[in-house]
Image (spheres, coloured by chain):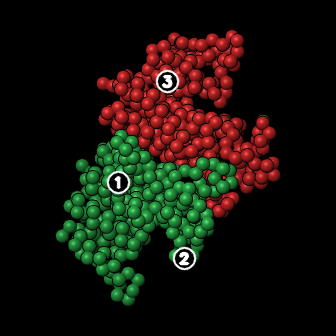
Chain colours: A red, B green
C-alpha cells in the first residue's frame, strides 16, 4: 500500500516576487513546481494531497474587485468569495500543469481539485485583533468611509503606502470534505485542496454556515488536514533548503532536525520571523504532535533527498 | 441502491435578471434553489450531481478583470481562468447553501465541489465562426486595437451597445474527472461539477493541455457527463414548466412528452430559440440517444412532480 503525503506550497509556487503575474508566468511556475513533485509521485510512490497558498493571487483579485466596482459599478464581493475565486484559478492551473508533467513521464495518475471550506469559530480571539493586511491601499478618508459602511478595520501601512484593511487569521477547526479528500487520495488520485488555507466559514446560527472576512493560515490548515487524514508525511515547502537559527546573521546555523520541544523553544526565542518561517514551524509542531509522524520543511528542489530539509520530530 | 441523477441549473439559479448580483442575492437564490432539490434528495432518494451555468457571473468577472487592468495595471487573465474563478465562486455558494438546507432537513449527506476541465478539439469548426458574445463592450477603435494585439474576434452588438468579443462554443469531448465524479456521487456524496460547461482545454501538442478562449454550452457538457456516468435521470432546469411549440404565440402548445425524432423535427422547424431552449433540446436529445434513458426539461418548482415537465424519450 502506498503511503500518503501532504505537500503544502506557498502562493509563490505560481507567482514569484518580482513577477507581474501573467498567466504565462504562473503556468510556467506551476509546471516547474509539478516537475519537482515527480520525485514524491514516481520515486517515492506516495499518494499525494497538494495544498497551496494564494497571497499574491487573492491580492490581485481583491484589486480587480475594487476596480470593477469603481469603473463599472459592479457589486463588490467579500473576501470569502475572492478566496473561492483563487481556489478555482490556482487549483485549475496546478491540476493542468501537473497533468502535463504526468503525461510527459508516462504516469497514469488522475488529479482532482476540490473547493475547500474550513470552519472557524466566530469567538476566536483573532477576531478581536485583526492583523492580516489584505487588498488595496486607501487614503485615510476612503478607509474611514468604508469602515463606517462595512465595519471593516483599517490600519496604516508601516511603509507609508496608505491605509489597508486588516482581517483576522483565526484557527482552522474542521476541514470540510476531509473524508472525501482522504478516500480519493488513498485510491491513488492526486488531490489539490485547502487552497489559500481554505474558504473561512462559521456558524452564524444553528444549521447556518456563512462565509467570514478572514484569512486562514495555509500551513496551519494544511497541518490540520494532514493530521486528520492520517498522512504519513507532511512537507512544508518554502524557499530555503533548511530551517536556520539566527537566520541571515554571522551566527546562522542550519538545522537538520529538531524535536517539537526544541522547536517551541526556538520560536519563543524569536528565531523565526512572523509571516514567514514562524507559521511553518507552528504547523510542523501541530502535525507532529497530533500524528506522531515527522514533518519536513524544505524547498521543492530538495524534495525526496534524504538530508534535504529540516525534519521536525516528536522527541 | 440509489439511482443517479444529474441536474443542470442555469447561471440564473444564483443571479436572476434584474438583480445586481450582490452576494446576499446570490446566496439567497442558491438557498432557494437548494430547497427545491430536496425533493430529489429526500423524497426520490437520488444520488446527485449538480451542474450549473455561469453566464452572468463570468460576465462580471471579465469586467472586473478589465477594470483591474485599466485602473491598477494588473495582468488580464484569459477566459479559461475567468471560468475557473466562476467555478470556485458558484460551486462554493451552492455547496454552502445546499449544506445549510440539508442541515435544516436533518439529512446527513456530504457535498463536494470539483473544478472541472473539459477537453475540446482545436479543429472544431466552431473556432472558424465564433458566435458567443462575452465580456465588456468596446468602441470600434478599442476593439480593433485589442484584436490586433491578441487575435480576438469582435462583433458589433445588434442593440448598438458597442463592439464585443465573440468566442467559439466548441463541442465538449471529454469531462476530466468523470470517473471520480461518478464514484463519489454513487457513494452518496452530492457532487457540484462542470460549472459554466467546464473550463475549455485542448491539446496544444502531445502531452500538453492548454486552456483556450471558448465557452462550452453547459447543457451539452452536462448531457455528456450524464451519459458518460450512466445517470438514470437528467434534469435540465429552466424558467418554464414545460417545453412549448409556437412559444409566446396564440398557437402555443405545451408538450408533456416528445421522442427524439419529434424533438429534432421541432428544432428544424424553428420552435426553439437559440441561446435559450434550443441548446436544452439538443442536450436532451444527446443524453437520450447515448443513454437510452429519459431527459426532463422543467423548472425547479416542478421537480419530482410526475407530470411536472416535458419528458424527452427515445421512441
Looking at the image, the residue that sits furthest to the left is B315
Please tell me whether mark 1 sits on a helix, a strand or a loop. Answer: loop
> Closer to the observer: label 3 or label 1?
1
Closest to the observer: A59 or A18?
A18
At which x and y percent is residue A144?
Answer: 79, 51
Disc 2 crowd rating (10 Å Cα; few below 14, some 14-19, many 20+) is few
Report the disc number at residue A301.
Answer: 3
Lateral position of residue B147 relative to residue A96, left or right:
right
Q: Residue at the location (54% across, 60% down)?
A: B147
User: Hey, which residue is sitting farthest front in the picture?
Assistant: B148
| Residue occupying image coordinates x 59% and y 42% | A21
For residue B119, say whether it is visible. Answer: yes
Neighbor class of circle 1 (other Cα within 10 Å; few <14, some 14-19, many 20+) is some
Q: Residue B108's spot in the image, x, y percent?
A: 39, 46
Q: Please, which chain is the residue tagged with disc 1 on?
A: B
Task: Identify the residue under disc 1.
Answer: B121
Q: Nearer the viewer, residue A74 or B15?
A: A74
Element marked by disc 2: loop
Tag on residue B159? 2
Is B268 above or below relative to A83?
below
- Say which label, 2 or 1, has the lower sequence index: 1
Locate residue A154: give its quadrant.
top right
- Point out residue A90 in the picture as x, y percentages from the top left corner: 50, 42
Question: Alpha carbon of mark 2 to alpha carbon of mark 1: how far?
Answer: 32 Å
Q: Tell me where residue A294 appears, x and y as whole percent.
A: 47, 18
Q: Are marks 3 and 1 in contact (CB under 8 Å)?
A: no
Q: Are marks 3 and 2 on the same chain?
A: no
Q: Label 3 vs label 2: CA separation?
A: 56 Å
Amino acid at each position: 500500500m502506498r503511503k500518503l503525503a501532504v505537500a503544502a506550497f506557498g502562493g509563490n509556487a505560481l507567482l514569484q516576487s518580482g513577477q507581474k503575474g501573467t498567466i504565462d508566468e504562473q503556468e510556467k511556475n506551476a509546471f516547474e513546481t509539478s516537475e519537482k513533485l515527480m520525485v514524491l509521485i514516481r520515486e517515492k510512490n506516495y499518494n499525494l494531497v497538494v495544498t497551496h497558498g494564494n497571497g499574491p493571487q487573492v491580492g490581485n483579485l481583491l484589486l480587480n474587485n475594487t476596480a470593477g466596482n469603481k469603473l463599472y459599478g459592479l457589486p463588490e464581493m467579500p473576501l470569502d468569495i475572492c478566496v473561492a475565486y483563487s481556489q478555482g484559478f490556482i487549483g485549475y492551473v496546478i491540476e493542468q500543469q501537473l497533468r502535463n508533467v504526468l503525461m510527459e513521464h508516462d504516469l497514469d495518475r488522475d488529479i482532482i481539485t476540490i473547493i475547500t471550506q474550513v470552519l472557524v469559530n466566530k469567538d476566536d480571539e483573532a477576531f478581536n485583533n485583526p492583523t492580516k493586511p489584505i487588498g488595496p491601499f486607501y487614503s485615510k478618508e476612503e478607509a474611514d468611509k468604508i469602515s463606517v459602511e462595512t465595519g471593516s478595520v483599517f490600519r496604516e501601512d508601516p511603509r507609508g503606502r496608505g491605509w489597508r484593511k486588516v482581517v483576522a487569521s483565526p484557527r482552522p477547526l474542521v476541514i470540510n470534505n476531509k473524508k472525501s479528500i482522504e478516500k480519493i487520495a488513498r485510491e491513488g488520485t492526486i488531490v489539490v485542496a485547502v487552497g489559500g488555507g481554505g474558504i473561512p466559514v462559521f456558524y452564524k446560527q444553528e444549521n447556518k454556515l456563512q462565509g467570514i472576512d478572514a484569512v486562514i493560515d495555509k500551513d496551519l490548515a494544511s497541518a490540520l488536514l494532514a493530521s486528520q487524514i492520517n498522512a504519513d508525511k507532511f512537507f512544508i515547502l518554502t524557499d530555503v533548503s533548511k530551517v536556520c537559527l539566527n537566520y541571515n546573521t554571522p551566527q546562522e546555523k542550519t538545522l537538520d532536525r529538531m524535536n517539537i520541544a526544541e522547536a517551541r523553544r526556538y520560536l519563543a526565542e524569536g528565531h523565526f520571523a512572523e509571516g514567514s518561517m514562524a507559521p511553518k514551524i507552528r504547523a510542523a509542531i501541530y502535525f507532529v504532535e497530533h500524528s506522531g509522524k515527522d514533518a519536513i520543511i524544505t524547498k521543492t528542489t530538495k524534495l525526496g533527498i534524504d538530508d534535504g530539509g529540516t525534519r521536525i520530530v516528536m522527541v
